[in-house]
Image (cartoon, rainbow, N blue to C red):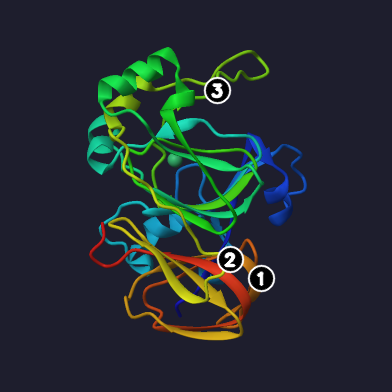
Amino acid sequence: MTDILFFEPHLDERIWGGDHLRHLYNALSSTQPIGEAWLISGMKNASSTIKNGKYAGKTLRDCFRENPDYFGFSESPEFPLLVKWIDAQAKLSVQVHPDDAKAKKMENSRGKTECWYVTEAGPNSYLILGHTANTKSELAEMIQIGDYENLLRKVKIQKGDFVYIPAGLLHAIGDHVRLVEIQQASDVTYRVYDYDREDTFGRKRPLHLQQALAVTTVPSPSISIINYSNSQGIVRLVTSPFFTVEKWTISSSLLWTNKEKSTSLFVVLEGEGTVQQLPFKKGDAFIIPWKVDAVQMKGKASLLHAFKLRNER
Ligand code: ZN
């Protein structure tokens, strides 16, 4: 029998987080702010756990290693995608990730391209997407003198916005933003600017300026933001070499055929319903393995659907 797998997230306490994820995932024993829920993760020390079916109680990390054929990502020794819900009550540091080639050379790791679907934003919420420097030396100089006011491109955002963040793009999440992040499974991050913040012991978090300069794309590509608040049915948000993402809006019922024969990752953004009679609600994450030919979903809900086309890495 091929199960649809539901997940218990790995929750990460972060100083910049809030209490939304604690309530969403019923982690009421914790009193610290929670910044990230790793909903579908096979990452070391931060794997999500399977809740149902024959693999119940196993981490996705172990399950993937023991049953690679179940997931069908045969080209990848580790689970290749990572899905998080992020609650940024304070702003996050400005950072950049390498692409696959540079990550291999610099860290012997996978690179990181990611994308964000904004689920909540305050009236003044923004993202940082790219920079204004025209050359590497201009970028280095503006970082050196700390001219972030002129360097960083700030873009206002609202609920329902979607943005694709290629490796090499300088980026950050501003304050009072909640978003779902779908990315290549990698934790290589080079921090460029942390607003000179100090922790309670007066320490600053380390920066990685040399590495960041080596991997940042100059000049920055233009990045488009598209709003999908009122989308209907199945809408494709991005097709990339790393993942394809769709938004699904279900108003009563939907019969879906897995034409691509791909393993599908889902996050429930809003509402509730069932998939093959298994109930789901806002915040839930599940995987439909590639061997499942068709599923019926019922209910009133919106979901993100992420998968890798067969020829994708
Ligand atoms: Zn990032």
Residue occupied by mark 1? 271
Residue density around tag 3, few if under 14, some if 14–19, many if 20 or more, within 10 Å: few
Answer with left or right where residue 47 lies relative to residue 281.
Answer: left
Counting residues from the N terminus, which is met first, the one under dot 2 or under dot 3? Answer: 3
Q: Is mark 2 within 8 Å of ligand 1?
A: no
What kind of residue is marked 1? Answer: Gly
Answer with left or right where residue 104 lies relative to residue 148.
Answer: left
| Image mark for residue 195 | 3
Quarter of the rendered structure image containing ligand 1: top left
Q: Residue at x 44, y 59 (%)?
A: 63
What kind of residue is marked 3? Answer: Tyr
Mark 2 vs mark 3, foreground winner is: 3
Residue density around tag 1, few if under 14, some if 14–19, many if 20 or more, within 10 Å: some
The quarter of the image holding the N terminus is bottom left
Q: Position of residue 115 (x, y in %)?
A: 43, 52
* Distance Cα–Cα, label 2 vs label 3: 33 Å
* Distance Cα–Cα, label 1 vs label 2: 7 Å
Q: Nearer the viewer, residue 96 or 274?
A: 96
What kind of residue is marked 2? Answer: Val
Disc 2 is placed on an element classified as strand
Above or below, comparing residue 237 to residue 97 in the picture: below
So how many labels did they put on this image? 3
Q: Choose top left, top right, bottom left or bottom right for residue 140.
A: top left
Disc 3 is placed on an element classified as loop
Answer with left or right where residue 99 lies relative to residue 185.
Answer: left
| Image mark for residue 268 | 2
Q: Nearer the viewer, residue 264 or 197?
A: 197
Q: Residue at x 60, y 43 (%)?
A: 125
Disc 1 is placed on an element classified as strand
